[in-house]
Amino acid sequence: MKRPPPAEIPDAPGAYLFRDAYGQVTYVGKAKSLRKRVASYFSRDLAPRTRAMIDSSRRVEWIVVDSEVAALFLEYSLIKEHLPRFNIRLRDDKSYPYLAITRSDQWPRARVVRGSKKKGTQYFGPFAHAYAIRNTLDLLLKSLPIRTCSDTVFRRHQLKDRPCIEYEIERCSAPCVGYVDPDTYAEYVDGLAQVLTGRAEELLVRLERRMLAASDRLEYERAARIRDQVRDVRRAVARQEVVTDRPEEFDLIATEGDDLEVSVQVLKIRSGRIVGRLGSIIDKVEDVTPAQIMATVLRDLYDEASPPPRLILVEALPPADEPWSDLLSRRRGSRVTLRVPQRGAKRRLMQTAKTNAADAFVRHRLRRQSDHNARAKDLRSLQAVLALREPPLRIEAYDISTIQGRHTVGSMVVLEDGLPRRSDYRRFRIRTVQGQDDFSSMEEVIRRRFAAYMQDLEKPVSERGKFAYPPSLVLIDGGPGQIGRAVEVIDRFDLQIPVAGLAKRMEEVYVPGQPEPIIIPRDQPALHLLQRVRDEAHRFALMYHRQLRGKRMIDSILDDVYGIGPARKKALIREFGSVKQMRNADLERLARVVPLNVAENLYATLHGNN
């Protein structure tokens, strides 16, 4: 990589991005002085991992901002957008469950979720076990009956004007049919949030006052129900472990690791109780100090959906010359303090968290060593079998699905480092091929994929899509015919990408220019890897084909029924989902969705009586 002239780099705060030959961002950093920081990457005494990053990059860019805090925010947003491979970042050791309340809905819903967070939703946790939060939620719904059903189920019962079984067992107040007013429902939602944030006493005081008032009015049955609600809330609160004598609120972060990875354990303390735990792993793809690791945790752990508490206890303070307290305070909307506990209960709690981090790190290292070694063995085996210049770190597999030439679709699945990368999966509805022609269908899919790649190369890097990164190996589900079409397309674009095909008969592997197939022994890791990615491509294509076929079948039948237009068609699909379910339904059930005369027409059509 050529070093940019120092005079061209501004001596101002900002963020910088290293990019590889394909324009992908390999590393993002921030600096008080871009000129000094970027220049440091071109010295001779670089750490091995930093040297690897520089060797894989082709150019560096920078963005100037007006302050260090703005540089921190920009670095965070760029890392979140590009996910550079050489940046250290927090990643879940597993996907921990949260309890979410969908505040943006007219009637908010409580549910246990995993994965990315959404705006308009309030999250509580994370929790170590999904069953623990589900049990707690079951207890709370008896006294705070808010809905847990999906939007589809909610709308279905709105149309039926009949509540579901959750109302019958007193775990929902049935907002779908108007059995609860918005103000009362909002109280239930706020009460649930209070308990989950460790502020249950306010709710308990309010419930006990209502219980006494009902008793004074001689409404003993109502008072007894409220008494049971108080009991359930107290039982739910008792499940949260008490760790401090006073009702304090803080997060505690402990770490343990080696030169390659770090285990992070986060305890969320609210009103003196542990209300959430998070265990994560950091990949140390650059040489960093404990202070810099803590800065990474603080950067990735808190955002607008999960703002920090007023106090965060850490093992090591982040670098003193970086305004982390200011950044966290902006995310919270009020002052946030970072502190290292020195003595007392908080120090003992830090030691406990550090022990948990050490145990988690040992378990992760044993799992990762086994998993990583197995995947590396698979890739090296495939490299040797196909005589590739390097291990195929990104494999794209393609398959065609059709029945007698109808609803023909194609699929593309991606494996990176031997693991599925589902965000890069793509599916294609065949446009130019009539009838059953797998060869031409495969040619169309490959042409559209790599035409998109060539078009992306002509765009600015910031506007490129996910097709902009080429594979190390293209795997075709089929034999010489499908491979020949794929190779023709790739050669037409003047690309140097290896192609192989795996035929279902005898699991023979075909490569271009070789008339005889490669027979891989059944016990070879290369064959297992090829079968796995081929089967995944087939599964993904078949799923799309069935989806299209089912939709067309429903459309064709409903279009023939007098009285069914677009609105009624949507209502029927929403209620039944398939022709089979409609055919199994009796006339009375069909008449709950559409008028009786239309239901009679539909019933006759489904059962061949018209």
Image: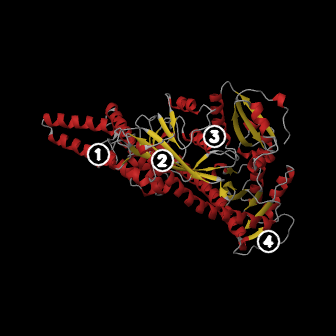
Mark 1: which amino acid?
Arg
- The image's mark for residue 80 is 3
Where is residue 23? Give x, y as percent: 78, 41
Label 3 vs 4, first from the N-terminus: 3
Crowdedness of circle 3 by 10 Å Cα count: few (<14), some, many (20+)?
A: few
Q: CA distance from mark 3 to mark 4?
A: 43 Å
Mark 2: which amino acid?
Met
Q: Quadrant of residue 375?
A: bottom right
- The image's mark for residue 181 is none
Q: CA distance from mark 2 to mark 1?
A: 28 Å
Label 3 vs 1, first from the N-terminus: 3
Q: Quadrant of residue 181?
A: top left
- In the image, which is nearer the foreground, mark 2 or mark 4? 2
Where disc 4 sits, the SS reads loop
Q: CA distance from mark 3 to mark 1?
A: 40 Å
Mark 4: which amino acid?
Ile
Where disc 1 sits, the SS reads helix
Q: Assign the N terminus to one quadrant of the image.
A: top right
Mark 3: which amino acid?
Lys
Q: Dot 2 corresponds to which residue?
A: 350
- Judge from the rendering whether residue 403 lies leftward or rightward of residue 123; answer left or right: right
Where disc 2 sits, the SS reads helix
> Marks 1 and 2: in contact by CB < 8 Å?
no
Q: Dot 4 corresponds to which residue?
A: 518
Q: Tell which of 64 and 232 is nearer to you.
A: 64
Q: Dot 1 corresponds to which residue?
A: 234
| 584 to 337, vertically: above or below | below
| 487 to 431, vertically: above or below | below
- In the image, which is nearer the foreground, mark 3 or mark 1? 1
> Marks 4 and 3: in contact by CB < 8 Å?
no
- In the image, which is nearer the foreground, mark 2 or mark 1? 2
